[in-house]
Every structure is written in C-alpha cells, then in structure tokens.
Image (spheres, helix red, strand yellow):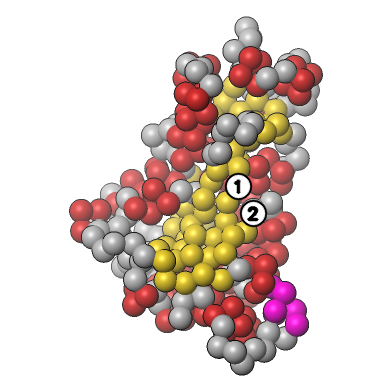
Amino acid sequence: MKKPVVVGAVGLASTLLLAGCGGSNNSGGSTATATTTSAAAPITASGKVQILYAGSLANLMEHDIGPAFAKASGATYEGTGAGSTALVTEIKGKVRPADVFVSASTDANTGLMGTANGDWEDWYATFATAPLVIGYNPRSKFAADIKSKPWQQVITETGFLMGSTDPKLDPKGKLAAQALTTANIPSSAVQVFPEEQLVGRLQAGQLDAGFFYSSEATEVGIPTIPLGAAYKLKATYTVSVLNNAPNSAGGIAFVRYLFSNAGVAFMKKHGLQLQPITVTGTKSDVPSALDAPLGVK
C-alpha cells in the first residue's frame, strides 16, 4: 500500500471568490489555475453515473447535486446513500457497482486502499467537515430539559428515547459511541437505526433526540445543542473516483461538478463547513482532468 501524502490544497471559498472576479491570475498559483480551467471547460458525461455517498448527504445529493449534475452534463445520475462503513463493505464485496464514493470518514477510504483491500482507491480528496451534535424533537416532553440541562443527564432520564447509527456500519455511530464513552454513559442509552432512517424517526416523534451531523440537522430544521468543548467529534467528507469504475469518465465529470461554483453553492446551502481541499495519495494517481479542480500541481 502506498503511503498517503498530501499533494494539493485549494480553498473552496477562495476558488468561488476568484471565479466571481473572472479568475485570471498569471502568478501560477494552483487556486487560480483550478478556477480558470474548471470555468472554461464544460462538464459533460454520458450513460449512468453511479454515486455511493454517506447517508448524511442524502438531501444534498438527491435534491440538488444529483439532479443538477444530470441536467448540466447530460448523464443519468444514480445515487445510493448509507453508512460509509457499510458502503465500503458493499464496494469490496462487489454488491453495488459505483463510479464515485463520497465518505464521511477518511477511515472508510483507507479501507479501500492497498492490495489487501482490493485496490479500489488510489487517492481521495477531503473537502468538508460537519460537527457531531445532538438534534432533538421540539415537540418532545423532554425538549425543555435538553435545552437547559446537561445532555449527559437528560438522555439517561427514564423514558428518554435517544437514537444513533450503528458504529459498525457508520462513522457517525462510531463518533456517537466515542461521545458516550467520554461521558461515561453506557451504549444501552441509545437505540441504533440505519443512517437513512434516523432523521425520519426523529421527525415522526419516535425519538426524543439523536446524534446527528450539524449539516444534516440544519438542512431539515432540526434544533440542536452542541456536545461541548470536550467533544471534538466531526464528520470529514471525502470523495474519490473508484478504480475499475463502470463509468470512470462520468465519475470524473461528477467530481468536477461537485467542485464547480454550482456544486460549492449547493454544499454551502446544505450546511457543510467547506475546507481547503487536500488530496491523499500520489499525484500520478489523480485523473488529469481533476488536477485543476483539486488543486493538484
């Protein structure tokens, strides 16, 4: 397995600003090159482009990025959201063919790299984060308590229904388990559900609260409370075009769209905290069409 190295970095906010100003810069900086190149070249694709993504990104992918990419490129978008760890298992087991993998944890990407893991990935780009928070149902009889008392106390009260995802299948569940351990609360204090069900169960009143990423709670109007300064837990979102993808050209086009002005605007709309893009892997592993969008020199 190749040792991961950072080969490129570019600030999304700076890219968006430069694009709005015309993006011309002759100084040779990677940010300017990424902006001008991606702005000049149309994003086109054909056939079906299959995206496996962290379930916390379902609204972003299915309501905005996916349909907009299909309209802009001419390709057919097909997305599937689930826990990132579960998706890794499906990729390695060849259960779901995919062109692009969008994860909520770098650990998931590591599980796809190297001969022992099937060489499904040679590189991945990290682009955004979202803190882990507690989202609660404002109609819950415990709503006043969750806003005014320590959450560590409230979720252990009799009758309180707290939800999480499975630590074995989803990075968010793993982070939630870490929060419980830090708070010295047993895992039995939470009920475990698939990631794609957690928001719906809370909104339906089947849960009083749950562990969520700030972005997924914000986009659907779920009120939240922070875990506190002692809990520095967050999703780290990554993207990669998989090796042996059925439609690698389509996958590359999707990643280009993700980091286009439109894609960046959608990600901001859905509450992701955009970070300077960093690419893990070797420079030669990144498709040349993505050198500019990812800031690879």
Q: Which residue is drawn at the image coordinates 68% and 19% (left, top)?
A: 150
Q: For the stretch drawn in magenta, what is the main secondary structure?
A: helix
Quadrant showing the N terminus: bottom left
Residue located farthest toward the top when viewing the structure as drawn: 158
Rendered location of residue 149, percent (x, y): 72, 18
Q: Which residue is drawn at the image coordinates 37% and 75% (left, top)?
A: 283
Q: Is residue 14 left or right of residue 121?
A: right
Q: CA distance from mark 2 to mark 1?
A: 6 Å
Q: Which residue in the protein does label 2 denote?
A: 273
Query: Within 10 Å of the Cα at label 1, are there few (<14), some (14-19), or many (20+) other Cα atoms?
Result: many
Q: Which residue is drawn at the image coordinates 69% and 51% (left, top)?
A: 271
Q: Is residue 44 above or below residue 154?
A: below
Q: Is residue 233 above or below residue 227?
A: below
Is residue 65 within the magenta segment?
no
Say which element carries label 1: strand
> Residues in magenta?
16-21
User: N-terminal of the two: label 2 or label 1?
Assistant: 1
Rendered location of residue 78, percent (x, y): 51, 60
- Residues 152 and 247: in front is 152
Q: Is residue 82 above or below residue 147?
A: below
Say which element carries label 2: strand
Q: Is residue 271 above or below residue 168?
A: below
Rendered location of residue 132, percent (x, y): 59, 38
Identify which amino acid the numbered label 1 is placed on.
Ala
Circles 2 and 1: CB atoms closer than 8 Å: yes
Q: Is residue 290 visible?
A: no
Find residue 79 and name its label.
Answer: none
Q: Which residue is drawn at the image coordinates 32% and 50% (left, top)?
A: 111
Identify which amino acid the numbered label 2 is placed on.
Gln
Q: Which residue in the protein does label 1 denote?
A: 130
Residue located farthest toward the left when viewing the structure as drawn: 116
- Residues 182 and 211: in front is 182
